[in-house]
Image (tube, rainbow, N blue to C red):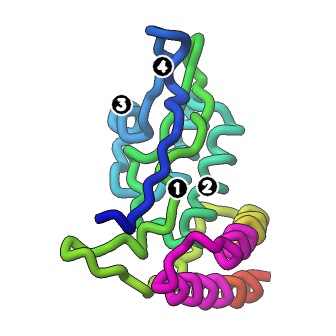
Amino acid sequence: MGTQRFLELERFDRVGLHGRRALISLASLDGEFVGNANAPWPVITAQLAKLGVITPEAHARAALLFAFGTLIGNTDMHAGNLSFVSDSGAPYALSPTYDMLPMAFSPTSGGVLRDSVAAAHLHGAVDRAKWRTAHALARGYLARLSEEAQLSPSFKSCIQALDEMQLGAAEKMARLD
């Protein structure tokens, strides 16, 4: 038990000692306005932006985050893991990012560390430019992971798997041209 590390962040939806900022999940907005719960984030956010529920910038950032998440092995990008904020109603802005990590490597229920990741699916709801930007960001993320001295030696195989997945994604992106 004493070998695991946890990251704790300050809540971005809290203001002052007792105040709160409106935080609305993609799941809630989808349920109210779109009804496509199993679709990837950029499919739903495109519809929400078209309806004026979220800002165009929120949709663009959500698509980029989805692409980045795909390229870092985040297998937990459900509609509850993306939210929007508002201080004055619609259209809503994208909230700060949370729960963006390579869940493909999460330990099994028995505590075994996974060390593989599936090939990246380059969903067509994200345009080529965003895939390329996300790839550059994901490569930077991988470089920082590779240099991190506090990661366990067993995580090195995860870094290698992520590198291979990202290289495969780059080959797919090259074929998009």
Mark-to-mark CA distance, 1 and 2: 9 Å
Which portion, as a residue range, is magenta? 139-168
**Residue flagged by tag 4: what amino acid is it?**
Ala
Q: Report if the CB atoms under discs 3 and 4 are less than 8 Å apart.
A: no
Mark-to-mark CA distance, 1 and 4: 21 Å
Name the residue that disc number 2 marks.
Answer: 65
Callout in the foreground (1, 4)? 1
Name the residue that disc number 4 marks.
Answer: 22
Mark 2 or mark 4: whose residue is earlier in sequence: 4
The N terminus is located in which quarter? bottom left
Image position, residue 177 (x, y; %): 80, 82
Give the main secondary structure of the magenta stretch.
helix
Q: Report if the CB atoms under discs 2 and 4 are less than 8 Å apart.
A: no
- Quadrant location of residue 77? bottom left
Image position, residue 166 (x, y; %): 64, 82
Mark-to-mark CA distance, 3 and 4: 16 Å
**Residue flagged by tag 3: what amino acid is it?**
Glu
